[in-house]
Image (cartoon, helix red, strand yellow):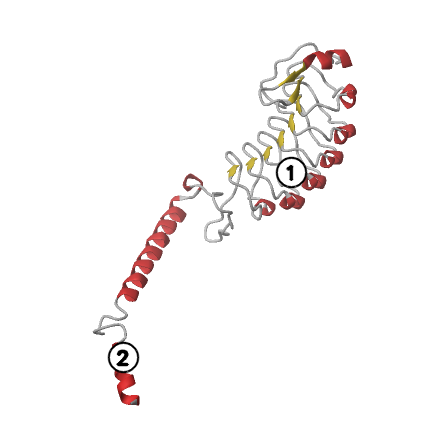
Amino acid sequence: MAKGKKGGPKGKKITLKMAKNALKITPEGKRRLDLSNMGIDNVPKCLLKLTEVEELDLSRNQLKKIPDFIGQLTNVRWLDLHSNYIEQLPKNIGQLDALRHLNLCNNSINGLPADIGNMRSLQTLNLGMNRLTTLPPSMAALSNLKELGLFDNQLTAIPECIRVLPNLKKINTKRNPVAYAQGDAKVVKASEGLCLVREEDLCKLCLEKCKEERQRLKRKRLSNQSQKRNAFSGLITPNSVAQSNQEQWR
């Protein structure tokens, strides 16, 4: 179960009036509805009448299920659902194709719908502290994703779908049972600025092999540079051979 819950009475109902009173304007001018830490166990359907909401905070509640109508909140750009009891997401969440930031940290999610790949505007996605063992291949379509949190899950391998994300700059895979098979390690193709393997995740033998290979490549590079510098060492001038041949032709 999700950890660190603090909330009000269980099953608290949120009315439209309560939701309107909780609606605020952020310093950036965004309309933000903060319903966090309210002790609610159902996403209030009155949210459908608040079409102007751009940021929605439902974190630190007792939500176990996200309703299908979540897909109708198409104006929401920022959605925070962290620290609930959510086990699954509805496929309709993929209809939030304008959503940029999604926080699902500290839930009990054991799988993601393939439709999450339709959320092409996503820039940050926090899936940390869940029960994920894999990710759907459709996530390879999240071409705008820049930050991805996968810490404290049950991943035994780096998912293939995140290796091809062109704009991914930050990824956190700490505290997963990722296995690195000695002598059978597969190289992860990483985007620029993306590091998927840390030194502390490698065994002593593999780490030594990596260091030896790094030194070998460095020596080879220095050797190639030296050979290029000495290519014309026996010539008086770079054009001396050409000048000699020209005299013979004459």
Q: Is residue 195 above or below residue 103?
A: below
Which of the 4 image quarters holds residue 51?
Answer: top right
Which of the 4 image quarters holds residue 58?
Answer: top right
Q: Amino acid at mark 2?
A: Val
Res. 241 mark? 2
Q: Nearer the viewer, residue 157 or 190?
A: 190
For image coordinates 36% across by 52% down, the residue present is: 214
Residue 134: percent from left, percent from top? 62, 41
Q: Quadrant of the C terminus?
A: bottom left
Badge 2 density bin: few <14, some 14–19, many ≥20, Cα 10 Å: few
User: How far apart in space, not on screen, are marks 1 and 2 (Cα)?
Assistant: 61 Å
For image coordinates 67% across by 45% down, the residue present is: 138
Q: Is residue 237 left or right of residue 23?
A: left
Q: Earlier in the sequence, mark 1 or mark 2?
A: 1
Which dot, 1 or 2, sits closer to the camera? Answer: 2
Q: Is residue 32 above or below residue 250?
A: above
Residue 33: percent from left, percent from top? 67, 19
The furthest residue to the front: 250
Q: Nearer the viewer, residue 131 or 26?
A: 26
Res. 11 mark? none
Residue 141: percent from left, percent from top? 65, 45
For image coordinates 58% across by 23% down, the residue present is: 28
Image marks 1 and 2: residues in contact by CB distance under 8 Å:
no
Q: Is residue 249 left or right of residue 67?
A: left
Residue 110: percent from left, percent from top? 66, 34
Q: Amino acid at mark 1?
A: Ser
Q: Secondary structure at mark 1?
A: loop
Badge 1 density bin: few <14, some 14–19, many ≥20, Cα 10 Å: some
Residue marked by disc 1: 121
Which of the 4 image quarters holds residue 115?
Answer: top right
